[in-house]
């Protein structure tokens, strides 16, 4: 802990530690956020005190901030210990324990909720701020996209000497960042344009083409020339060379996250070559992307919280011979309003069998029906994997009827498409390196945690599970 902390701050941090410990003993998870809340209640200036004499990078955006922060932290670890909030605790109460638990003076890579960026930046005086993207998210909790962009814009105006690493492909981010004193534009891509059709500057229409984008009214808002971009698996930084990015994480969007993280790491003193090499060692982010052995199949957990996130993940799903499990909850942390499901382009999945799961499997099933996606239902995590395994390698074609969801029990009554067609298509199945079939599970926030908890006993089971799969039944 920083020696410069006041007596009050030290007492507040200590009380937070006790509260976290008490919460842990009472079964309240790690208790870090509760500890952080207690600390901040006793000393509201604690975040500022803990950030003094550190190089702090903040990462914010609607999608990819947890992964980008993890990648940035792995790069900064080249310099030594790093303060880093994992587990998605991205409010001030989550930042306090991350800072308090790291050596004084160590650099910090902190993920920040997009609505809290201003308050956190004012407190920690960051040296670098990474702005990834803005799209619709949790309709009942988060402000409308342009509102958030407007607040970011005023945050950026207050940043002073900090370097803003901003996504040149997102008009909302560019509008928010363009008056920054120091900005590094990175071509981070934009998979979701539905929230950036209108110009945030003049309300004109944004025109997109292969060259980029610009406001159609000529108000001057346009894609700035990027200082770094991804070409294939190379990070191209004119004047600083090409750097190979060999990520263990899937997807084009993660290459873009890595590009943003690498440029930020370079601003914090880690050479690009070392930053990209360190990032290639990251294999999972808080349980995301990790493959867990579950009986005869392997499950890969993927987290998506909003339409942009779902659309990105559709591109990394295993080939369509594999059924995918989608799990939806609508608790407070997810947003209580699941109507965002209607914005997700599920139509793109026609031809793939989906297992609808989670507490809101009925909402999902209705959406899938209107999207014309064949689906079956199993609200329980392990049952959903079992069902996916049953249909592995069958594809769907026209043989499986949609809407088998009125009663999840009926799923046992119908045969797989391959049975009916009399042809075994299992040889097309995608397998992992141990020959196990991989089922992708895409879940929103609390549904993801439920799957992670359900799979943990299987993952932690004796290594035996790798050689002699146990039945899920
Ligand atoms: Zn305009």
Image (spheres, rainbow, N blue to C red):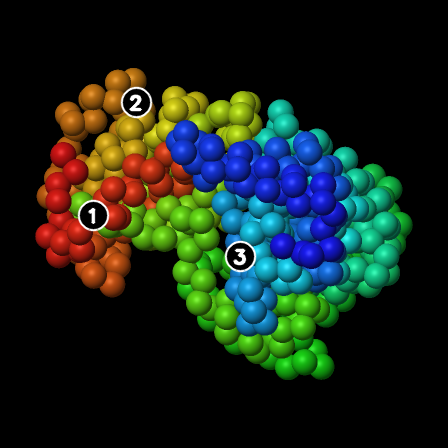
Please determine whether, in this image, residue 197 is positioned above or below residue 188.
Answer: above
Please determine whether, in this image, residue 43 is positioned above or below residue 172.
Answer: above
Q: Which mark is residue 70?
A: 3
Which residue sits at x=75%, y=42%? 45
Query: Which one is nearer the viewer's eye here, 27 or 344?
Result: 27
Q: Is residue 3 visible?
A: yes
Q: From the viewer's perspective, is the residue at label 2 or at label 1 nearer?
A: 1
The residue to which callout 1 is attached is 461
Please determine whether, in this image, residue 365 is positioned above or below residue 156.
Answer: above
Which residue sits at x=53%, y=57%? 70
Which residue sits at x=68%, y=68%? 268
Give yes or no for contact between labels 3 and 2 (Cβ–Cβ under 8 Å). Answer: no
Direction from residue 18 to residue 11 in the image, left or right: right
The residue to which callout 2 is attached is 405
Residue found farthest to the front: 7
Expressed as whole percent of the image width and height from the top left, the position of residue 356 reads 35, 31
Cα distance between the residues tagged 2 and 1:
32 Å
Other-residue count near label 3 (Cα within 10 Å), few / some / many at <14 / 14–19 / ≥20 = many
Label 3 vs 2, first from the N-terminus: 3
Please determine whether, in this image, residue 126 is positioned above or below residue 376.
Answer: below
Q: Quadrant of residue 109?
A: bottom right
Name the quarter where the C terminus is drawn.
Answer: top left
Q: Secondary structure at mark 1?
A: loop
Expressed as whole percent of the image width and height from the top left, the position of residue 427 reads 17, 56
Q: Secondary structure at mark 3?
A: helix
Expressed as whole percent of the image width and height from the top left, the position of residue 233 reads 51, 71
């Amino acid at each position: 802990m920083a020696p410069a902390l006041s007596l009050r701050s030290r007492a507040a941090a200590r009380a937070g530690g006790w509260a976290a410990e008490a919460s842990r003993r009472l079964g309240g998870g790690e208790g870090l956020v509760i500890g952080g809340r207690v600390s901040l209640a006793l000393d509201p200036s604690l975040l500022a005190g803990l950030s003094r004499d550190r190089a702090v990078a903040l990462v914010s955006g609607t999608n990819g901030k947890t992964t980008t922060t993890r990648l940035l932290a792995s790069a900064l670890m080249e310099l030594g210990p790093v303060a880093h909030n994992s587990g998605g605790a991205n409010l001030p109460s989550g930042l306090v324990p991350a800072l308090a638990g790291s050596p004084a003076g160590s650099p910090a890579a902190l993920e920040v909720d997009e609505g809290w960026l201003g308050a956190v930046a004012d407190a920690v005086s960051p040296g670098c701020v990474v702005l990834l993207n803005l799209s619709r998210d949790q309709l009942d909790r988060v402000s409308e996209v342009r509102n958030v962009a407007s607040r970011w814009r005023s945050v950026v105006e207050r940043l002073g000497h900090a370097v803003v690493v901003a996504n040149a492909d997102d008009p909302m981010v560019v509008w928010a960042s363009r008056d920054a004193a120091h900005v590094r534009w990175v071509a981070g891509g934009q998979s979701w344009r539905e929230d950036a059709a209108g110009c945030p500057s003049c309300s004109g229409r944004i025109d997109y083409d292969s060259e980029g984008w610009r406001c159609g009214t000529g108000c001057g808002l346009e894609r700035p020339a990027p200082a770094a971009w991804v070409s294939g698996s190379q990070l191209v930084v004119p004047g600083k060379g090409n750097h190979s990015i060999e990520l263990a994480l899937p997807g084009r969007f993660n290459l873009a996250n890595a590009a943003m993280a690498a440029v930020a790491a370079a601003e914090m003193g880690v050479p690009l070559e070392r930053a990209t090499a360190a990032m290639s060692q990251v294999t999972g982010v808080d349980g995301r992307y990790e493959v867990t052995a579950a009986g005869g199949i392997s499950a890969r957990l993927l987290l998506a919280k909003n339409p942009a996130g779902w659309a990105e993940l559709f591109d990394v799903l295993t080939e369509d011979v594999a059924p995918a499990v989608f799990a939806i909850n609508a608790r407070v942390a997810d947003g209580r309003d699941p109507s965002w499901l209607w914005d997700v382009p599920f139509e793109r999945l026609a031809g793939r069998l989906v297992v609808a799961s989670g507490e809101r499997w009925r909402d999902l099933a209705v959406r899938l029906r209107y999207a014309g996606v064949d689906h079956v239902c199993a609200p329980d995590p392990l049952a959903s994997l079992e069902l996916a395994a049953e249909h592995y390698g069958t594809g769907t074609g026209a043989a499986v009827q949609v809407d088998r969801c009125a009663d999840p029990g009926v799923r046992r009554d119908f045969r797989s498409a391959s049975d009916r067609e009399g042809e075994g298509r299992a040889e097309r199945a995608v397998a992992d390196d141990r020959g196990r079939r991989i089922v992708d599970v895409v879940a929103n926030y609390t549904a993801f945690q439920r799957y992670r908890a359900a799979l943990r006993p299987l993952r932690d089971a004796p290594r035996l599970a790798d050689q002699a799969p146990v039945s899920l039944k």
